[in-house]
Image (spheres, rainbow, N blue to C red):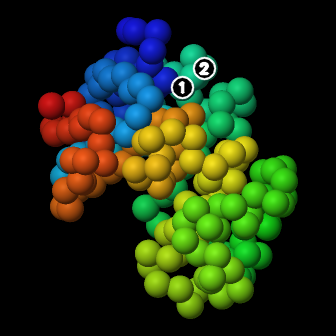
Amino acid sequence: MSGAAVVTVEGLVVRRGQHTVLDGLDLEVGPGVTGLLGPSGCGKSTLLRALVGVQRTHGGSVTVLDHPAGAAAVRARVGYVTQAASVYDDLTVSENLRFFARVLDVPGDRVDRVLAEVDLADRAGDVVGRLSGGQRSRVSLAVALLRRPDGPADEAERRVMAGAIMGVLILTAQDTPLPEAAMDRALSILDSRLS
């Protein structure tokens, strides 16, 4: 596979019981915005978990920045936002970010920057449990962005503000189409394979 790939997946197999979720998946993802499309249950979230190294696999390999997915060398360089908000409902937006900044051992001054990036600076003192679903998701996104030392790094991040893997952004959708203008490329998973 090419040296320009930031993410390389070769022959990835993931099973849940007798069901094969991903069957020999091969792909390369380079810098930019990649849309990952497919119906519910096709393996989009499973693939993302494999990319961050938290998915049990049954074959194949996944490398991120020339290291095995989940390796210590890349953990500090990967941001991941799950489908569900992954913050504390009983803390304020700012308290959540300051807590995660300490856990991630990043400077506390990044909190204000990421709050502005996700358009929540005016909600910093609000308790997360009282926010809308979209706002709660943006708090989770802000946590993922804490690891980035600088603001939006390139055109892809300016076009779409979301979790990034060293300039690589993978968005997923099942029922709602992703805007074509936001993507450099689109991948579709169907029947456990890229199509």
**Mark 1 residue type:** Val
Which type of secondary structure does the marked residue at label 1 adopt?
Answer: strand
- Left/right placement of residue 101 relative to residue 18 reads right
Residue nearer the viewer, 91 or 42: 91
Q: CA distance from mark 2 to mark 1?
A: 5 Å
Dot 1 alpha-carbon crowd within 10 angstroms: few under 14, some 14 to 19, many 20 or more: many
Residue nearer the viewer, 35 or 189: 35
- Left/right placement of residue 48 relative to residue 181 reads right
Residue 118: percent from left, percent from top? 55, 66
Residue nearer the viewer, 154 or 77: 154
Residue 186: percent from left, percent from top? 24, 38
Q: Residue at x 45, y 41 (%)?
A: 155
Total of numbered circles in the picture?
A: 2
Q: Residue at x 15, y 31 (%)?
A: 195
Residue 106 shows which numbered tag? none
On the question of residue 32 being in view, the answer is yes
Residue 47: percent from left, percent from top? 39, 39
If the image is split into quadrants, where does the N terminus sit? top left
Q: Residue at x 49, y 69 (%)?
A: 137
- Vertical position of residue 89 compared to residue 195: above or below: below
Residue 112: percent from left, percent from top? 73, 67
Residue 27, by quadrant, is top left
Residue where numbered disc 1 is placed: 64
In this view, the residue farthest toward the bottom is 130
Residue where numbered disc 2 is placed: 67
**Mark 2 residue type:** His
On the question of residue 58 being in view, the answer is no
Tag 2 near tag 1, CB within 8 Å: yes
Residue 20, by quadrant, is top left
Dot 2 alpha-carbon crowd within 10 angstroms: few under 14, some 14 to 19, many 20 or more: some
Which type of secondary structure does the marked residue at label 2 adopt?
Answer: strand
- Left/right placement of residue 15 relative to residue 164 reads left
